Amino acid sequence: MAEGAQMPGACVIEANLDATGTGIRASIYTLCLASGILKTIIQLTTSEKNYTEFCQAINSALQLQGLALLCTAVYQTLKGQLTLFHAICVLHLLSLLGFGLVAQRRYQGGGLNRWLVMAALRVIIACAFTTLTAYIWATAPTFGNQPDCNASTVYVVFGVSIRATNDIFRYVILALMASMAFGWVLSMVMYVVLAHCCCGGARSGMKWAKQNLISGQVVQLFIQTGINVYMIVTLEQIVKRNNLSKEEKEWTFGQILAIFVLLGVVVEVINILLLKLDGDLEGVPMQNEIELRPQENVGGRRLP
């Protein structure tokens, strides 16, 4: 199927502006593309403490927006208000954003209890996402409030259009999900084991890691940006190749609110840059301070 082409008489998919509206997609695209670039720039221009707090703020903005989108998808699925097309788009956006609960600051203190609570929340959220994803793909032919449109719903992989209800395609995705879930559980177990048994070795390796941090992050930035660009282009192809209602392009309060989420990131960047500017100015004495400062000769006597 050619890009942008739609089958004559194809089922028209109803709009769902809270899930895949233009403003929501634009906000998510901007956050995902800018986050890696801004993190690298901020790291080179400010202190380690400021960089850490900036990363916390960025991650919080990304993952909270992802969590809100996940909760919206779960609620609409339970109410039978989500179409297969919008469910696929939500999963695609969540893979861009990530999702979870991240504090905007790292607070001192705390121990096992805080770790257990945060770990439990992460497990609950991850299980909700996994269950939703498995349910969507397992019931794709009959999923949602417009099952008649599911047979004509198109997914895009590397520019190639694939029917979202194709059995082989769905089974491959479910198999990949199972392997990823197993890998996630295994990584959590390994993390706990290493945290208790190899703390000394981890600390000794930190010096070597810091020396190679900048070069590694630049490479990671290019890889992450490339993946994000591919996923954004793919999602826009999915939107164009499906027969959507004209209302899908309208703007609502929820989409405008999503755009304003970007202002929080802009404020963080401005604060970091102004803090850097103020620090540079503090190190340079003003001209009138230089003129009024008493001068001394070698013998310690003040000169007129």
Image (tube, rainbow, N blue to C red):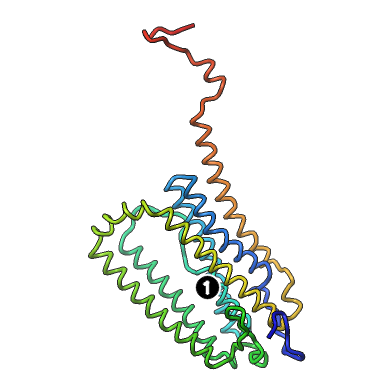
Q: Nearer the viewer, residue 165 or 261?
A: 165
Kindly identify the residue that appears in the image at 37 percent across and 77 percent down: 183
Quadrant in which the N terminus is drawn:
bottom right
Q: Where is residue 260 in the image (x, y as percent from the top left)?
A: 64, 59
Which residue is the site of mark 1? Answer: 95
Kindly identify the residue that appears in the image at 52 percent across and 89 percent down: 170
Q: Position of residue 257 (x, y in %)?
A: 65, 63
Q: How many labels does the image show?
A: 1
Q: Is 294 placed above or below 42 here?
A: above
Q: Is 42 placed above or below 291 here?
A: below
Left or right: where does residue 6 sit relative to residue 115?
right
Packing grade of label 1 (10 A; few <14, some 14-19, many >=20) is few
| Residue 255 position by quadrant | bottom right
Q: Position of residue 13 (x, y in %)?
A: 70, 84
Kindly identify the residue that appears in the image at 49 percent across and 87 percent down: 172
Amino acid at dot 1? Ser
Kindly identify the residue that appears in the image at 48 percent across and 31 percent down: 283
| Label 1 element class | helix
Left or right: where does residue 291 sit relative to residue 185?
right
Q: Position of residue 75 (x, y in %)?
A: 57, 79
